[in-house]
């Protein structure tokens, strides 16, 4: 049974349920004792300014899960493409690149025993 999970949220603006479930799946795994990292990739980084907004319905959920230290950040390339770099940094999250064209590299996580969950 895998003990480490990398959850990649690629949900677009219309995919509210996918974003919520990606976050709460990470929370469930964390509370069950698994190592979890959550990243926003593809369309996903667009969610960070929304979730970090105090008026958004999922803001309390986002902040509670962020306080667990499992939300790592966003793909640097995708955050730049969608012009949310400052929003990602303001939310206290990191930008990760390093693969081709500064995209999030999943290889290093797979090589370190993480199972991928892409939402």
Image (cartoon, rainbow, N blue to C red):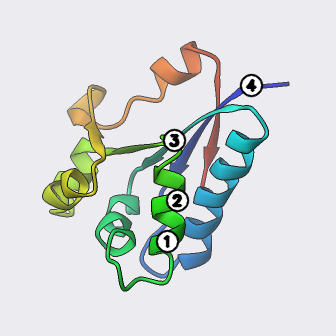
The CA distance from mark 4 to mark 2 is 22 Å
- Is the C-beta separation of discs 4 and 2 under 8 Å? no
First-in-chain label (3 vs 1): 1
Residue 70's mark? 3
The part of the image, by quadrant, that contains residue 99 is top left
Residue 89's mark? none
- Is the C-beta separation of discs 2 and 1 under 8 Å? yes
Q: Nearer the viewer, mark 4 or mark 3?
A: 3
First-in-chain label (4 vs 3): 4
Q: Assess disc 1: are there few (<14), some (14-19) or many (≥20) residues with their C-alpha within 10 Å of its C-alpha.
A: some
The CA distance from mark 3 to mark 2 is 10 Å
- Is the C-beta separation of discs 4 and 3 under 8 Å? no
Residue 60's mark? 1
Q: Assess disc 3: are there few (<14), some (14-19) or many (≥20) residues with their C-alpha within 10 Å of its C-alpha.
A: some
First-in-chain label (4 vs 2): 4
Please name the residue that numbered disc 4 is placed on. 3
Could you say whether the residue bearing mark 2 is in a helix, strand or loop?
helix
Q: Assess disc 2: are there few (<14), some (14-19) or many (≥20) residues with their C-alpha within 10 Å of its C-alpha.
A: few
Whole-percent x, y for residue 55 in the image: 36, 86
Residue 64's mark? 2
Could you say whether the residue bearing mark 1 is in a helix, strand or loop?
helix
Q: Is residue 5 left or right of residue 80?
A: right
Q: Assess disc 4: are there few (<14), some (14-19) or many (≥20) residues with their C-alpha within 10 Å of its C-alpha.
A: few
First-in-chain label (3 vs 2): 2
Could you say whether the residue bearing mark 3 is in a helix, strand or loop?
loop
Looking at the rendered structure, the number of numbered marks drawn on it comes to 4
């Amino acid at each position: 049974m895998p003990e480490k999970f990398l959850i990649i949220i690629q949900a677009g603006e219309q995919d509210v349920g996918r974003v919520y479930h990606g976050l709460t799946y990470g929370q469930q795994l964390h509370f069950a004792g698994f190592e979890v990292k959550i990243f926003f990739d593809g369309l996903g980084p667009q969610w960070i300014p929304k979730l970090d907004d105090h008026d958004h319905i999922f803001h309390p959920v986002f902040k509670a899960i962020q306080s667990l230290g499992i939300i790592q950040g966003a793909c640097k390339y995708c955050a730049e493409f969608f012009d949310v770099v400052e929003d990602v940094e303001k939310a206290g999250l990191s930008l990760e690149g390093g693969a081709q064209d500064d995209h999030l590299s999943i290889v290093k996580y797979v090589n370190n025993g993480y199972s991928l969950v892409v939402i």
